[in-house]
Image (cartoon, rainbow, N blue to C red):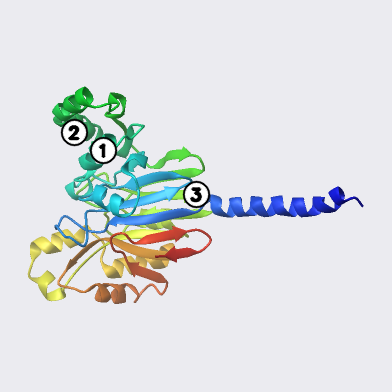
Amino acid sequence: MTLKHSLLPCLHLFLALLFFIDTARAGYMEVTLLGTGTPKPSIDRFGPSTLIEANGSYFIFDSGRGVSIRLQQAGVALSKVENIFLTHLHSDHISGLSDLWLTSWIWQRQHPIQLTGPVGILALSQHLELAHQADFAYRTKNTNLNPNFFPILTKEISSEGIIYQHNGIKITAFLVNHNPVEPAYGYRIDSGEQSIVISGDTSFSKNLIKHAKGADLLIHEIAAANSELLAGNPRLQKVISYHTTPQQAGQIFKAAEPKAAVFNHVLLFGISERAVLDATRESFNGDVRMGYDLMKIGVGDELIFY
């Protein structure tokens, strides 16, 4: 046997290992919780926003207060963001949108922003562009910013289903129950064998359970209040009614059976985070964690929290 022939099996094994590694990592995604807060101003919890990096692309889900600052802290150039998905049009989920859109353009974004979300985002994007016409005129006149990257490309979701499919990434929109806000969507992101589900704002939702079944990671909102405080406050009772309580979250997680669940949009009144987790674990004995701003999660064959 010649040296050339004796090396062939090794070469085939090496190529097979490379293929296995590429295939194993092809579905890998990395999550950064940019903001885990609510309408309440907080230095610790900025407005709702989640970043997912998959196959070299960056996807933002909701664009709450301070999203641009958190991206900078996470070491992600604003100019890399191409796609923004909105779950619904409550102000705390969109208040950082104009900053992210304009500041990424100022810092040499080389493509338009694609905005996807419920009916109403077309009017939102058109009025944002109108509101910032003076800034557009100043900057295109005195700098080399490309005017073609200023307009927001907008895609309104009219029904459930696949809304994005490219480069091995599939994103599915599904309806959740955030009455009186209609429509409100959650999103499922699939990459290879891996999957992430983002609930958006919702109360208990069987449709969410259906779409989150068996996901690697379920990022879910949470709302809770001290029982005495809740009993004497009708307005708070109404707010809690269209969000998810710890007890409901436990039921959702038990039914959906994700590898892990993480809370975001943390809306708590006079109750500790520990009490929320304890109440959730009464029904769900899996991995559930309280999310915090800039938490990172690697989603591959295993989940890595760091």
As rendered, which of 79 and 120 lies closer to the eye? 79
Res 68 seen here: yes
Q: Position of residue 18 (x, y in %)?
A: 65, 52
- Name which residue lies at 61% across and 54% down: 21
Tell me the kind of residue under disc 1. Answer: Trp
Q: Spot the residue most to the right.
A: 1
Quadrant of res 30: bottom left
- Name which residue lies at 9% across and 61% down: 235
Residue 128 circle label: 2
**Is tag 3's residue or tag 1's residue first in the polypeptide sequence?**
1
In the figure, 57 relative to 293: above or below? above
How dense is the environment of label 3, judged by Cα within 10 Å: few (below 14), some, or many (20 and up)? many
Q: CA distance from mark 3 to mark 1?
A: 26 Å
- Contact (Cβ within 8 Å) of mark 1 with mark 2: yes
In the figure, 251 relative to 173: above or below? below
Tell me the kind of residue under disc 2. Answer: Leu
In the figure, 96 relative to 272: above or below? above
Which quarter of the rendered picture does the C terminus lie within? Answer: bottom left
Q: Which residue is mark 1?
A: 101
Which marked residue is nearer to the observer: mark 3 or mark 1?
Answer: 1
Horizontal side of residue 115 vs 125, given as left or right: right
Which marked residue is nearer to the observer: mark 1 or mark 2?
Answer: 1
Q: Position of residue 67 (x, y in %)?
A: 25, 49
Element type at marker 3?
strand
Q: CA distance from mark 2 to mark 3?
A: 32 Å
- Name which residue lies at 25% across and 35% down: 106
Residue 191 circle label: 3
**Is tag 1's residue or tag 2's residue first in the polypeptide sequence?**
1
Q: Position of residue 255 (x, y in %)?
A: 41, 65
Tell me the kind of residue under disc 3. Answer: Ser
As rendered, which of 155 and 243 lies closer to the eye? 155
Q: CA distance from mark 1 to mark 2?
A: 10 Å
